Amino acid sequence: MKTDYTYAAARIHVKELSLLTRADLEQLAGAADVRAALQLLSEKGWGDPEQELTAENMLRHEAEAAWEVVNDLEKDPAALSVLKLGKDYHNLKAAVKQVYTGSSLPAERLFQPGGTLDAGVILKAVEEKDWELLPAPLAQTAEEASVLLAHTGDGQLCDSLIDKACLGELYRAGKASPEEVLQEYAVVTCAAANIRIALRAARSRRPLSFLLDSMLPMEELDTKALAEAAYEGKDAVAEYLETTPFAALVPSLSGSMAAFEKSCDDLLIEHMKPQKNNSFTLGPLAAYLLARENEIKCVRMILTGKQNHLPDEVLRESLRMTYV
């Protein structure tokens, strides 16, 4: 029987009222220093009053609070698992490297909460080479990455292997979902990753074979055409993208990678905004989570900028599109 999300959507719409607006972010970017910025956020209800007022405490609390809200409304843990896959694969990267290097860094500095699996399970699987502790796609990637790093010592190559596996799993799971919002999330995320690879390769003149091997094949983007364009240069990439559903990213290609990343984040939020009106689907819940992730990322950049004494105008240029 199809789930009725009417009540959940109504609750989420109330929560949307507390999301940061563009004006809020502008005010935050103009704060005198990081302490003043944290105080402004605290006044807007961010953070845990019982914790020390630090950037990391506040950001960690808000990320956990967003999922607590949604988990309270959606009782099926698998419904939104597509949005958690990135954290599983991030934690796999951390686990493989920790085991290889013998690092003793504390878990909170290495692993991200909120995946489909506890990070400790992933670490145990890698430490003991007990791949049966992990679901099949993640287990295969864990074994391949562990072997690759042990034989080559190349952390970048290991990251590339895990990143591509993550995108493949995310794309398959998203496309298989009956929820349009998760399909769109998967498509935009994977397309952005492929274009990012193309842009970096266009600058370094990587071989065409390397590009084709690095990119994730997908229906919505001809990766062969994109790879061939990247081999010619950034202008050719822009020309190709003009013919695709991702033409909105083209203006950002003339700037820095930071400008491109901002454009990707804005495109995803643009795709999420219509979900406000889909009150009978999972859409509002998923869109709310992505909106919160986007604003937390934006706040993190502002706080980091304040810590490094970046000018206010530089911070304002990096502000993302808001959901409200």
Image: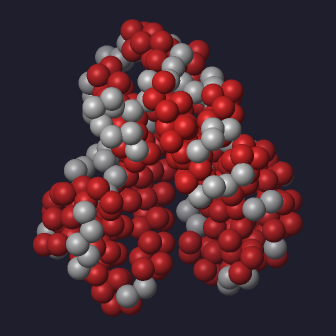
- Quarter of the image for residue 111 reads bottom left
Q: Report the quarter where the C terminus lies.
A: top right
Percent coordinates x, y for residue 28 in the rendering: 62, 36
- Quarter of the image for residue 128 reads bottom left
Q: Residue 119 or 63: which is nearer the viewer?
A: 63
Q: Is residue 161 above or below residue 261?
A: below
Percent coordinates x, y for residue 267 in the rendering: 68, 41
Percent coordinates x, y for residue 161 in the rendering: 44, 72
Q: Residue at x 65, y 62 (%)?
A: 196
Outermost residue toward the bottom in this view: 151
Q: Report the quarter where the N terminus lies.
A: top left
Would you say residue 148 is visible in this rendering?
yes
Describe residue 64's horizontal placement relative to residue 121 as left or right.
right
Q: Residue 149 or 187: which is nearer the viewer?
A: 149
Q: Residue 320 or 175: which is nearer the viewer?
A: 320
Percent coordinates x, y for residue 163 in the rendering: 46, 64
Q: Residue at x 32, y 75 (%)?
A: 97
Q: Is residue 40 above or below residue 245?
A: above
Describe residue 319's horizontal placement relative to residue 109 as left or right.
right
Q: Residue at x 48, y 65 (%)?
A: 164
Q: Residue at x 36, y 67 (%)?
A: 93
Would you say residue 223 is visible in this rendering?
no
